[in-house]
């Protein structure tokens, strides 16, 4: 059986025992039916991962002794920040999950002029926590040891102002009405990628992005859906300058 990987926000060090609770504990005890003495892998997003041995298995609580630190890194050398219009239903979950698997380092949800999702207050806070958990679960599955940051949602104008402080990044805005291709850019180590929601970014938002140093980018002759476009772009970017290929 594949050794399960579990994220924890606890401090990890060898020869200490940590408690795992909630859904992670239920997954280990009920879904996987693990027993005392079996091995799991723990990571906390601080670098590397830890081999641990189960010392207690209960329905809602599992304890494990940390036995070894493994200095393993599976991160791309490419820093990639995805800013994307919030989508309806499960589309946003899919984007967060797959973008995490593909190696993005940071995701900023955007409320654009054409965003149909309305979130605020407690509902917004709950959604941000949900997206962060989606990213954590994706890291557990794909064996990343660093979890991408899910930023608080912003408007495109707010995000463009913040991204303007990163002068070293190649800044790209997906825009099907252009002939510019990724292969025409020189190799980089830092990318900011802006993608609209269903219906795309408005002309004003695209012009604002270009005015802030973003370059328009097309992926081909077909218009891709909002959940397809960022994943296709990230894959190509990682193939050109990252760790895929």
Image (tube, rainbow, N blue to C red):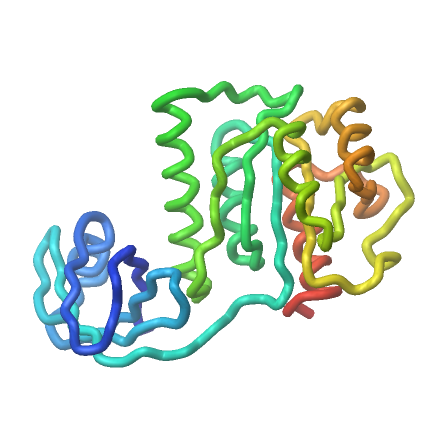
Q: Position of residue 213 (x, y in %)?
A: 80, 41
**Residue at 33% in and 65% down:** 43
117 w.r.t. 103: above or below:
above
Q: Quadrant of residue 127?
A: top left
User: Where is the C terminus found, in terms of image quarters?
Assistant: bottom right
147 w.r.t. 195: above or below:
below
Q: Quadrant of residue 61?
A: bottom left
Q: How many marks?
A: 0
Instruction: Classify residue 89 as left or right of residue 202.
Output: left
235 w.r.t. 110: above or below:
below
137 w.r.t. 216: above or below:
below
Instruction: Classify residue 37 as left or right of residue 136.
Output: left
Q: Quadrant of residue 173?
A: top right
**Residue at 85% in and 51% down:** 181
Instruction: Classify residue 40 as left or right of residue 97.
Output: left
Q: Position of residue 29 (x, y in %)?
A: 16, 59
**Residue at 56% in and 51% down:** 99
Along the viewing direction, whichever of 28 and 161 lies nearer the viewer: 161
Q: Position of residue 113 (x, y in %)?
A: 66, 20
Instruction: Classify residue 81 as left or right of residue 8.
Output: right
User: Where is the N terminus found, in terms of image quarters?
Assistant: bottom left
Along the viewing direction, whichever of 12 and 35 lies nearer the viewer: 12
**Most distant residue in the right direction:** 179
**Residue at 49% in and 49% down:** 97
């Amino acid at each position: 059986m594949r050794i399960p990987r579990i994220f924890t926000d606890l401090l990890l060090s060898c020869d200490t025992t940590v408690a795992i609770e909630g859904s992670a504990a239920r997954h280990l005890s009920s879904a996987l039916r693990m027993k005392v003495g079996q091995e799991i892998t723990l990571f906390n997003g601080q670098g590397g991962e830890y081999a641990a041995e189960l010392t207690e298995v209960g329905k809602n609580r599992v304890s494990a002794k940390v036995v070894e630190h493994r200095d393993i890194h599976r991160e791309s050398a490419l820093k990639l920040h995805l800013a994307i219009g919030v989508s309806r239903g499960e589309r946003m979950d899919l984007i967060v999950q797959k973008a995490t698997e593909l190696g993005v380092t940071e995701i900023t949800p955007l409320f654009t002029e054409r965003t149909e999702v309305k979130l605020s207050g407690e509902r917004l806070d709950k959604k941000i926590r949900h997206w962060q958990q989606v990213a954590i679960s994706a890291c557990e599955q794909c064996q990343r040891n660093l979890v991408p940051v899910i930023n608080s949602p912003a408007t495109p104008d707010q995000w463009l102002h913040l991204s303007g402080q990163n002068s070293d990044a190649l800044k790209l805005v997906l825009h099907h009405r252009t002939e510019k291709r990724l292969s025409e850019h020189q190799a980089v180590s830092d990318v900011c990628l802006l993608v609209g929601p269903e219906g795309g970014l408005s002309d004003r938002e695209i012009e604002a992005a270009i005015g802030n140093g973003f370059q328009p980018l097309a992926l081909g002759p077909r218009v891709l859906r909002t959940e397809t476009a960022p994943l296709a772009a990230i894959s190509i970017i990682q193939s050109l300058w990252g760790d895929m290929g």
